[in-house]
Image (cartoon, coloured by chain):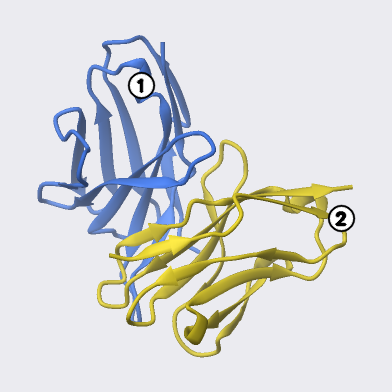
Chain colours: A yellow, B blue
């Protein structure tokens, strides 16, 4: 089975600083990769996804992530943090063979300091 | 993107009662839906896979007699928490699987906050 590791359950950055949220997965075959954001008492909102093609994926709200097969990573970045970015972020993977089963990381809570 | 709704968004009930949560895919047909549970400050835990017209597949450790899942149509799955107790209080999120040419994409509902008194 897949496992997804998000290093750092809490990340704090200053407003305007770089945001880097880490995600590593375990898989012998390239999976589909996702980043979701969750605001308090709300469902999941898809930020971006990688399925095939270009390994650098751009998403909403200025976020992007790069699939690095050699490092089994899919880290999420944003050049300049905004106060509204404060939320919980989840990395998820699903297997190409089925495309169905989702495996979520434990989440990273992002705090943006004014 | 596709839209998945959940109803109700919040429910408070007394211990021992049953609560039904609906999950609807509004603009596509979903033969497969998923139910997740999320505890505060934690990740989503897959509870079960709901298949239209057949029995749900439950993850290990999830009581199928307590969490009844019905997927009666291609746009509706329901989760009934039977004889709810305070420990069942949680955030329940459903997702619906939309078939695609390359891969099948999951779309998540907004969640239902269940509080059992």
- Vertical comparison of A21 with B9: above or below: below
- Regarding mark 1 in the picture, which secondary structure is present there? helix
Quadrant of the rendered image containing residue B86: top left
The circle drawn on residue A15 is 2
The quarter of the picture where the C terminus of chain B appears is top left
Residue B24 on image: x %, y %: 35, 46
Work out which residue is located at the far left of the displayed protein and give it: B54
Near mark 1 (Cα within 10 A), the count class, few <14, some 14-19 or many ≥20, is few
Instruction: Say if mark 1 contacts mark 2, CB within 8 Å.
Output: no
- Residue situated in front as seen by the camera: B63 or B95: B63
Q: Chain of mark 1?
A: B
Which residue matches tag 1?
A: B87
Quadrant of the rendered image containing residue A60: bottom right
Residue A37 on image: x %, y %: 59, 54
Residue in the picture at 43% in, 45% down: B5
- Residue situated in front as seen by the camera: B39 or A37: B39
Residue B14 on image: x %, y %: 36, 9
Residue in the picture at 27% in, 38% down: B78
């Amino acid at each position: 089975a897949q496992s997804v590791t998000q290093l750092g359950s809490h990340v704090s950055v200053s407003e305007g600083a770089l945001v880097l949220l880490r995600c590593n997965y375990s898989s012998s075959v390239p999976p589909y990769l996702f980043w979701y954001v969750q605001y308090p008492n709300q469902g999941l909102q898809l930020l971006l996804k990688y399925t095939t093609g270009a390994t650098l994926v751009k998403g909403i709200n200025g976020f992007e992530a790069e699939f690095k097969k050699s490092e089994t990573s899919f880290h999420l970045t944003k050049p300049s943090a905004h106060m509204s970015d404060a939320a919980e972020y989840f990395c998820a993977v699903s297997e190409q063979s089925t495309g169905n089963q989702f495996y979520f990381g434990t989440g990273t809570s992002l705090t943006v300091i004014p | 993107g596709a839209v998945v709704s959940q109803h109700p968004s919040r429910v408070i009930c007394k211990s021992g009662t049953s609560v039904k949560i609906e999950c609807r895919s509004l603009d596509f047909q979903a033969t497969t839906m998923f139910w997740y549970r999320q505890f505060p400050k934690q990740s989503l835990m897959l509870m079960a896979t709901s298949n239209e017209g057949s029995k749900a597949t439950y993850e290990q450790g999830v009581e199928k007699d307590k969490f009844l899942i019905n997927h009666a149509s291609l746009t509706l799955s329901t989760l009934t928490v039977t004889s709810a107790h305070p420990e069942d209080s949680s955030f329940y999120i459903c997702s619906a699987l939309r078939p695609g040419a390359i891969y099948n994409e999951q779309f998540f509902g907004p969640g239902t906050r269940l509080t059992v008194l």
